[in-house]
């Protein structure tokens, strides 16, 4: 009978601990990319072998064949030509424009791959590992170190 209060106390402690612990909250998933902040994170992540040059919206839309009126914000950094490296983050006016931009990014990768195959074949592996991601009405393209670019982009969404 003396063990009963101890057992009851132990059971109460277990119930109390169970009530206090809930499922581990998962970090909220990102719903959109932030051109200014996310581009800086990636530029500082060590995934690019050279310093990329900032490109304005007009030039970017010309290179990618995008309607500039659908781009509400962007950050774009391109190689000076020595490498295939690029970083582009676009905020678009709606889902249809985001889908178009996503396709344009893939087209850009294909075009660059064709160009670099004969010009500088050592850069093709970067294009093969290029990351194109869409979150909501934002699109991200990152062409960099094939071993780290994918993980760096995934870390942004966490």
Image (spheres, rainbow, N blue to C red):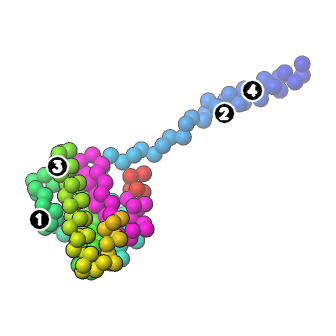
Please indicate, yes or no, whether residue 4 appears anywhere in the rendered image.
yes
Q: Earlier in the sequence, mark 2 or mark 1?
A: 2
Q: Position of residue 123 (x, y in %)?
A: 32, 75
Q: Nearer the viewer, mark 2 or mark 1?
A: 1
Q: Position of residue 34 (x, y in %)?
A: 29, 55
Residue 135 falls within the magenta-colored stretch: yes
Q: Earlier in the sequence, mark 4 or mark 1?
A: 4
Q: Which mark is residue 41?
A: none
Counting other residues with Cα less than 10 Å from the Cα at mark 2, is it few (<14), some (14-19), or many (20 or more)?
few
Q: Are marks 1 and 3 in contact (CB under 8 Å)?
A: no
Rounded to the nearest angstrom, the CA distance separating label 2 from label 1 is 60 Å
Is residue 105 depicted above or below 50 in this figure?
above
Q: Are marks 4 and 1 in contact (CB under 8 Å)?
A: no
Q: Quadrant of the N terminus?
A: top right
Rounded to the nearest angstrom, the CA distance separating label 1 from label 3 is 15 Å
Residue nearest the viewer, comparing 25 with 138: 138
Q: Which residue lies at the image location 24% right of the left edge and 59% below the top edge? A: 106
Q: Position of residue 90 (x, y in %)?
A: 22, 56
Q: Are marks 4 and 3 in contact (CB under 8 Å)?
A: no
Residue bearing mark 4:
11
Q: Earlier in the sequence, mark 4 or mark 3?
A: 4
Residue bearing mark 1:
62
Q: Earlier in the sequence, mark 3 or mark 2?
A: 2
The residue range painted magenta reads 130-153
Q: Which mark is residue 97?
A: 3
Residue bearing mark 2:
17
Residue nearest the viewer, comparing 90 with 127: 127
Residue 59 falls within the magenta-colored stretch: no
Task: Give the SS element for disc 2.
Answer: helix
């Amino acid at each position: 009978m003396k063990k009963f209060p101890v057992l009851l106390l132990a059971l109460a402690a277990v119930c109390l601990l169970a009530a206090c612990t809930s499922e581990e909250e998962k970090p909220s998933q990102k719903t959109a990319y932030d051109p200014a902040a996310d581009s800086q994170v990636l530029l500082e992540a060590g995934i690019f072998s050279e310093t990329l040059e900032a490109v304005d919206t007009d030039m970017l839309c010309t290179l990618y064949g995008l309607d500039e009126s659908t781009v509400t914000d962007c950050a774009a950094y391109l190689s000076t030509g020595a490498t295939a490296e690029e970083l582009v983050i676009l905020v678009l006016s709606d889902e249809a424009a985001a889908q178009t931009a996503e396709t344009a990014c893939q087209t850009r990768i294909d075009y660059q791959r064709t160009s670099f195959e004969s010009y500088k074949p050592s850069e093709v592996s970067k294009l093969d590992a290029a990351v194109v991601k869409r979150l909501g009405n934002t699109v991200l393209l990152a062409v960099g170190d094939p071993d780290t670019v994918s993980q760096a982009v995934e870390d942004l969404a966490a």
